[in-house]
Amino acid sequence: MQGKEIFVIKRITKRKLREMKILKFEHKSVMLKEAIEILQPKPDGIYLDCTLGGGGHSLEIGKCLNSEGILIGIDQDISAVNAAKEKLSALKCRVEIVHENFSGLEKVLDGLNVEKIDGVIFDLGVSSHQIDTAERGFSYIHNAPLDMRMNQEKNFSAYNVVNEYSEEDLIKIFHEYGEERFSKKIARAVVKARPIETTGELVGIVENSVPHTKNGGHPAKRIFQAIRIEVNNELEILSKSIVSAVNRLKVGGRIAVITFHSLEDRIVKNTFKSLAQDCICPKNFPVCVCGHKAEIKILGKTKTATNDELDKNPRAKSAKLRSAEKLGGYL
């Protein structure tokens, strides 16, 4: 079935490319000012951007660095990597850009002979460019191939999820990753309508399966989120990647994580909470036997976008920024 999935993507995309203009990679970085204030880049520091995207956060970090500083950017989307190479080319600091998923951040640092870093940022979710490039299949607004791959070198796509997953598995991801209360009804309709080749077909199936509400948003939004998370394995790698990033921070180094939906934010919140506490023994233990020591200090309250930013970039509405600082004295 994977061979068919690849054929469908190529066939439809070739036709669409004659009709649509390919967009330049553009992405409005959310809470840019707040993120830089948290990271407090040192001129000669080493900073890692785990989700390079359009390079907005990296560019601002890089502007703070001198020729002794190092900026490392990684992204699994080759379009983002290529765009960032051009955007960051004029910076004075050393710039290293790597095509990689952020789950491989330690491998990237090892490959660059970088043991410790001064700061790290994660800007999670799908970029504006990925949403607006119709043929990538991330948007429920445009009719396009069922794709949704952030790393387009991989064969597994939304087509595989929609057409190959069992009804039970679809119910599970629609419920867990989309928090969709009509998961069973939608999954049943999807299985019945197979084969499904385009986002437009999928949107129509969802619209015909759920009641329409005035203030509930587009009925396909949660389903597209769920499928995208499944295709890109977004949630399973998040907590481990944050732990890896904290392990590579210098004492006093800082981490900033921007999330865009409750599932991501919950994982970040719980991971930070675990890393920020000392004893992690079960509550019924009379004395501590784990010897665990807090690795980070959480910095202030969770930040959200200002009204001024929301006026300019409505997609920042659901964004939350959490941050922490690496502790020392026990390493």
Image (cartoon, rainbow, N blue to C red):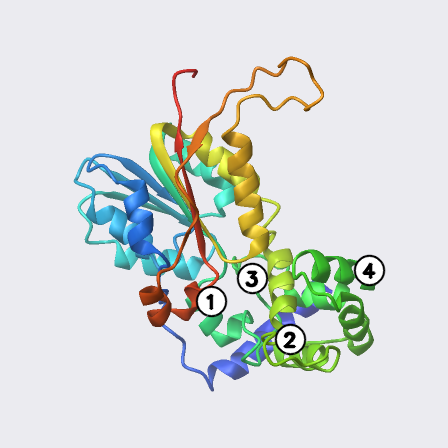
Query: Residue 168 shows which numbered tag?
Result: 4
Label 3 CA crowd tier, 10 Å (few <14, some 14–19, many 20+): many
**Where is residue 287 shown, x and y percent of the image?**
64, 13
Left or right: 34 as drawn, with respect to 100 = left
Q: Secondary structure at mark 2?
A: loop
User: Mark 3 highlights which residue?
Assistant: 149
Instruction: Kindly indicate whether the residue at mark 4 contacts the one at mark 3 (C-beta within 8 angstroms).
Output: no
User: Mark 2 highlights which residue?
Assistant: 219
- The answer to whether 129 is drawn above or below residue 29 in the figure is below
Q: Earlier in the sequence, mark 3 or mark 2?
A: 3
- Mark 2 or 4, closer to the camera: 2
Q: Earlier in the sequence, mark 2 or mark 4?
A: 4
- Mark 3 or 2, closer to the camera: 2
- The answer to whether 222 is drawn above or below residue 327 in the figure is below
- The answer to whether 105 is drawn above or below residue 160 in the figure is above
Q: CA distance from mark 2 to mark 4?
A: 20 Å
Q: Nearer the viewer, residue 181 or 53?
A: 181
Q: Is residue 234 visible?
A: no
| Residue type beneath disc 3 | Arg
Q: Secondary structure at mark 4?
A: helix
